[in-house]
């Protein structure tokens, strides 16, 4: 029997029995972890409200085996709030849908339970903090998070230099299969031809140039969001369900 302590983001919850829940976390040290929280659905629960999606929490786990992730689910025995991002996200529909897509994406990229995914964890914490702060439009925060999540998982897209031959940009054509923009010589059938301003926006979101991203016109971020969603679906091999509810 072992005790573990970690901090993490609550990704989702599932009902278990009459009063319990299974909580799915993305943690700093152990990656994705599913744990049972006993009695949290009762009105007198000490920490039920702390275990809602979007919450950044410090958790103590109790495991019956020698490892946190094993044959049986560990128990959540103690929870302390680090940052209640959910309180500032769930009361706004655009933030909520964008945040839900971020949680689902993070879980998909951290499918193997118990394996550290530190970069993905840090991206999610930073993304939720920015989303809750309301300093940038929700769709831009979501697209920036998706592009950076793809990049840290080995699927970074190029929006300037040719993804095949490296010809310095700007380049006109965009291919999901090729991993970004292509020059005229490397162009493949089915390549899209997005607006130059759209490619500038996507490059800004990937690099964190918020001044450029915030100044972008709606027609370009709509086109950019479509490319990001398609690129994400291509590499995950299936779509993110909550993306259909994100307002564009």
Image: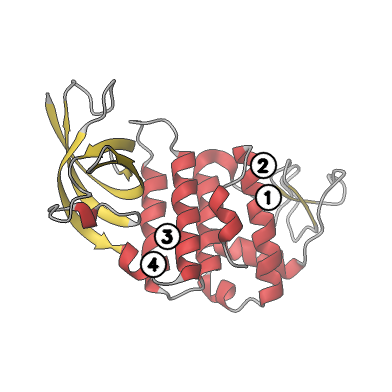
> Considering the numbered disc 1 on the image, is that residue within a helix, a strand or a loop?
helix
Label 1, label 4: how far apart the Cα atoms are? 25 Å
Q: Which residue is mark 3?
A: 127
Tell me residue 5's x, y (percent).
Answer: 17, 40
Label 3, label 2: how far apart the Cα atoms are? 22 Å
Label located before the other in sequence (3 or 2) = 3
Q: Residue at x 66, y 48 (%)?
A: 231
Tell me residue 58's x, y (percent).
Answer: 20, 49
Q: Locate residue 216: give its quadrant.
A: bottom right
Q: Residue at x 50, y 61 (%)?
A: 98
> Considering the numbered disc 2 on the image, is that residue within a helix, a strand or a loop?
helix
Label 4, label 2: how far apart the Cα atoms are? 28 Å
Residue mark closest to the camera, 4 vs 3: 4
> Considering the numbered disc 3 on the image, is that residue within a helix, a strand or a loop?
helix
CB contact under 8 Å: marks 2 and 1: yes
Mark 4 residue crowding within 10 angstroms, few (<14) / some (14–19) / many (20+): many
Q: Is residue 30 visible?
A: no
**Left or right: where does residue 121 sit relative to residue 3?**
right
CB contact under 8 Å: marks 3 and 2: no
Residue mark closest to the camera, 4 vs 2: 4
Colouring style: secondary structure
Label located before the other in sequence (1 or 3) = 3
Label 2, label 1: how far apart the Cα atoms are? 6 Å
The answer to whether residue 147 is above or below residue 155 is below
- Dot label at residue 234: 2
The answer to whether residue 212 is above or below residue 4 is below
The answer to whether residue 64 is above or below residue 93 is above
**Left or right: where does residue 159 sit relative to residue 173?**
left
**Left or right: where does residue 85 sit relative to residue 143?**
left
Q: Which residue is mark 4?
A: 89
- Dot label at residue 55: none
């Amino acid at each position: 029997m072992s005790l573990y302590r970690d901090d993490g983001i609550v990704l989702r919850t599932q009902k278990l029995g009459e009063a319990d829940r299974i909580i799915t976390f993305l943690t700093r040290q152990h990656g994705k972890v599913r744990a049972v929280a006993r009695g949290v659905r009762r009105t007198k629960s000490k920490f039920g409200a702390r275990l809602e999606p979007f919450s950044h929490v410090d958790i103590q786990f109790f495991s019956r085996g020698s490892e946190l992730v094993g044959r049986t689910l560990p128990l959540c025995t103690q929870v302390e709030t680090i940052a209640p991002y959910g309180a500032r996200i769930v009361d706004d529909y655009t933030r909520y849908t964008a945040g839900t897509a971020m949680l689902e994406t993070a879980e998909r990229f951290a499918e193997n339970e118990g394996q550290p995914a530190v970069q993905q964890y840090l991206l999610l914490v930073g993304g939720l903090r920015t989303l809750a702060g309301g300093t940038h439009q929700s769709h831009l925060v979501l697209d920036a998070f998706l592009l950076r999540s793809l990049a840290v998982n080995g699927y970074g897209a190029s929006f300037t230099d040719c993804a095949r031959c490296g010809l310095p940009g700007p380049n006109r054509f965009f291919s999901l299969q090729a991993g970004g923009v292509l020059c005229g010589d490397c162009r493949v059938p089915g390549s899209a031809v997005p607006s130059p301003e759209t490619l500038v926006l996507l490059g800004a979101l990937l690099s964190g140039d918020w001044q450029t991203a915030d100044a972008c016109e709606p027609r370009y971020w709509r086109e950019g969001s479509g490319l990001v969603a398609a690129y994400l679906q291509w590499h995950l091999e299936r779509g993110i369900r909550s993306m259909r509810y994100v307002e564009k």
